Image (cartoon, rainbow, N blue to C red):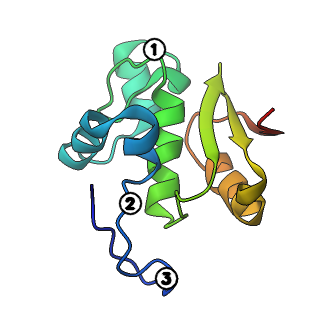
């Protein structure tokens, strides 16, 4: 488990893994930490892959966009202590949420829209 240090008083001192680790595993968190920031458009062109399939390390990843969105949520210090899941359908980001995530949903949606390769964001309550 990670100790996440941030400037948000409500989260200071709490242990949590972040969206990337929580949704995709610690290996992806470690990969992200080791990889320099990737230019999605350059990586897509160089590797002849669609931008939504560019992973955290610039290589092909079927869930590349969703992983990059999860990392962006972590980088934006959005709390992972709510029921929010990230998926993708092609180049569209899907944010599924529980009732407790409504307070961060607008911010999460804005972050997701800003991730390279995302053509749109759809939010849907978790059934």
Give the mark nearer the N terminus: 2 vs 1. 2
Residue at (36% x, 54% y) in the render: 17
Which residue is tagged 1?
49
> Mark 1 falls on what kind of element?
loop
**Which image quarter: residue 106?**
bottom right
Identify the mark nearer the N-term, 3 or 2: 3
Q: Can you identify the residue that label 3 sits on?
A: 8
Quadrant of the image for the N terminus? bottom left
Taking the view exactly as shown, the residue that stands out farthest to the left is 34
In this view, 16 is above or below 27: below
Q: Residues within 10 Å of mark 1 (few under 14, many from 20)?
A: some
Point 33% across, 30% down: residue = 58
Tell us which disc is closer to us: 2 or 1. 2
**Crowding near pointer 2: few (<14 within 10 Å), some, many (20+)?**
some
Residue 109 located left or right of residue 81: right
x and y percentages locating residue 13 in the rendered image? 35, 79
Rounded to the nearest angstrom, the CA distance separating label 3 from label 1 is 37 Å
Per the image, label 2 sits on a secondary structure element best described as loop
Location of residue 75 (image quadrant): bottom left
- Establish if 29 lies above or below 73: above
Relative placement, left or right, of 26 versus 20 is left
Frontmost of labels 3 and 1 is: 3
Which label lies toward us, 3 or 2? 2
* Extreme residue toward the bottom, this view: 9
- Return the residue at label 2: 16
N-term-proximal mark, 3 vs 1: 3
Q: CA distance from mark 2 to mark 1?
A: 33 Å
Q: Are marks 3 and 2 in contact (CB under 8 Å)?
A: no
Asked if the residues shown at circle 2 and circle 1 are in contact, with their CB atoms under 8 angstroms apart, the answer is no
């Amino acid at each position: 488990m990670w100790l996440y240090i941030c400037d948000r008083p409500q989260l200071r001192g709490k242990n949590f893994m972040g969206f990337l680790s929580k949704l995709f595993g610690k290996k992806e968190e470690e990969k992200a930490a080791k990889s320099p920031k990737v230019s999605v458009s350059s990586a897509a062109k160089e590797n002849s892959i669609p931008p939504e399939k560019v992973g955290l390390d610039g290589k092909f990843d079927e869930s590349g966009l969703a992983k990059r969105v999860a990392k962006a949520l972590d980088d934006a210090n959005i709390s992972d202590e709510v029921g929010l899941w990230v998926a993708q359908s092609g180049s569209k980001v899907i944010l599924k949420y529980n009732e407790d995530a409504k307070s961060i949903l607008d911010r999460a949606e804005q972050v997701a829209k800003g991730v390279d390769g995302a053509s749109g964001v759809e939010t849907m309550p978790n059934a």
